[in-house]
Amino acid sequence: MERYFQEEIECAPLEKIKAIQNEKLVKQVKHVWDNVEYYRQKMQEKNLTPDDIKSIDDLHKLPFLSKADLKECYPYGLLACPLKDCVRIHSTSGTTGKRVVAFYTQEDIDMWNECCARAIVAAGGTNEDVVQVSYGYGLFTGGAGLDGGSHKLGCLTVPTSSGNTERQVMFIMDLQATILCCTPSYAAYLGESMREMGYKPEDIPLKAGIFGAEAWSEEMRRGIEEVLGIKAYDIYGLTEISGPGVAFECSEQHGMHINEDHFIAEIINPDTGEVLPEGSQGELVFTSLDKKAFPLIRYRTRDICTLTREKCSCGRTHIRMSKPKGRSDDMLIIRGVNVFPSQIETVLLNNGYAANYQIIVDRVNNNDTFDIKVEMTPDMFTDNVGEIQSRKKILEDGLKSMLGIKAKVSLVAPKTIARSEGKAVRVIDKRKI
Ligand code: DLL
């Protein structure tokens, strides 16, 4: 039977959710207007005052915020409460320039922990579980978020953080961990390592995994489930809006429920900013309704997905988002064609490979080169040139029909592509455009 962390809110009728959102939005817009000079100016540029926002039907009037605004306001420009009320920061994993810094009051952290507790319960967790949190702790939100959720639910929390695979395995086995939280690429790596150490799925005490922070396919889900002998659940979130737990999967595993009492989701056309009807694919935009320290209104995530209000068999009523297809800024344009790493991953997994690959794009004599290095699995590893050539051709043909352009595949020996303990690095784009 499905369990909930907060049934009356997670299963509330739509009218009740809308009423909560209406009330909170009006208050939040006033809070931001009163406390954030930058946002007040943005509203004034659109001739808006808080009086123009009477309900969620007026949301579309408000200006968007984007990563560029966050960079411009770094570090304190969007802070909406006195510094003395803030107790924590987290920061995104940007590799160039200034990072985004998000602030939290204790109330903000409590709300976020509650969202993660909902996610753990939706994955079958109770206070009898032993939850191993193998997301990174520190500036990244993964470790702190699931750790907070696990505490809130009263689970025994094992804060291993990421890395040190042998120690991870030792704790899973010795402490009989039942729920594993980490990135899907690290879960796949842990599974692969455990298999090599001789563990069979039935020897492993884990029953569920809560994996997110990066795009992963259904094929990858099946691979992780098989090797670890678990049910694998997706979890979504972003630092700017709090961290993991903005949305999470339930037993139905057909999209992730967005915690709508705390966040309003919209889908827009990324080119025009127009709000699209339910079911359309577009860019996901969030408004945080409760955050006091860093309340973002209409924040453009750059994640591409769809939303649905179709009834869910788990009983939760909150809107569901599809797995993000990739970020609009993950999308590569190669020889003029849009390519998402997730499409490549699907072809690899469908042909029996693991998701260990690297995409290398360059530009030579004004032409894009498109190379994909793919690891063979130990079972398929061979030095028979004819067999490698025929495997390579099958993959190149599969990729051509998925993407519409030709990629050059090279098959490499198992374990020769560096593994990541956090988010995987899949793309090396050497083009200087
Ligand atoms: O990745 C928060 C998180 C931690 C989510 C742990 C889930 C689990 P950021 O580092 O700010 O925060 O990156 C946010 O990661 O905009 C998406 O592009 C991507 N992302 C997060 N979860 C998923 C997911 C954390 N389940 C960015 N599927 C987001 C696909 C995801 N992409």
Image (tube, rainbow, N blue to C red):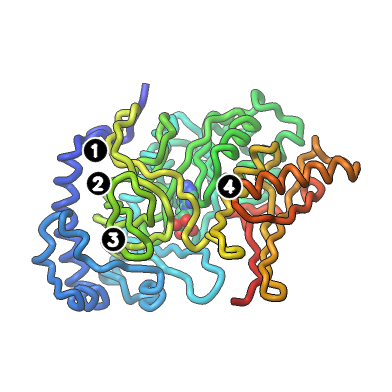
Q: Earlier in the sequence, mark 2 or mark 3?
A: 2
The type of residue carrying mark 3 is Glu
In this orientation, which residue lies closer to the viewer: 176 or 355?
355
Discs 2, 1 touching: Cβ within 8 Å: yes
Residue position marked by numbered label 4 in the rendering: 160
Badges 4 and 1: C-beta atoms under 8 Å apart?
no
- Residue extending farthest right: 384
Q: Which amino acid, mark 2?
A: Asp
**Numbered disc 2: secondary structure:** loop
Q: Crowding at label 2, few (<14), some or many (≥20) Cα neighbours within 10 Å?
A: many
Q: Residue at x 44, y 36 (%)?
A: 155
**Residue 394, position in %: x, y?**
74, 42
Q: Is residue 180 left or right of residue 13?
A: right
User: Callout 4: helix, strand or loop?
Assistant: loop
Q: Residue at x 28, y 61 (%)?
A: 274
Do callouts 3 and 1 mark residues in contact (Cβ within 8 Å)?
no
Q: Which residue is mark 3?
A: 274
Residue ID at (47%, 41%): 234
Mark before the other along the chain sequence, 2 or 1: 1
- The x and y percentages for residue 18 are 17, 45
Can you identify the residue that label 2 sits on?
Answer: 261
Q: CA distance from mark 4 to mark 1?
A: 32 Å
Q: Looking at the image, is mark 2 or mark 3 nearer the viewer?
A: 3
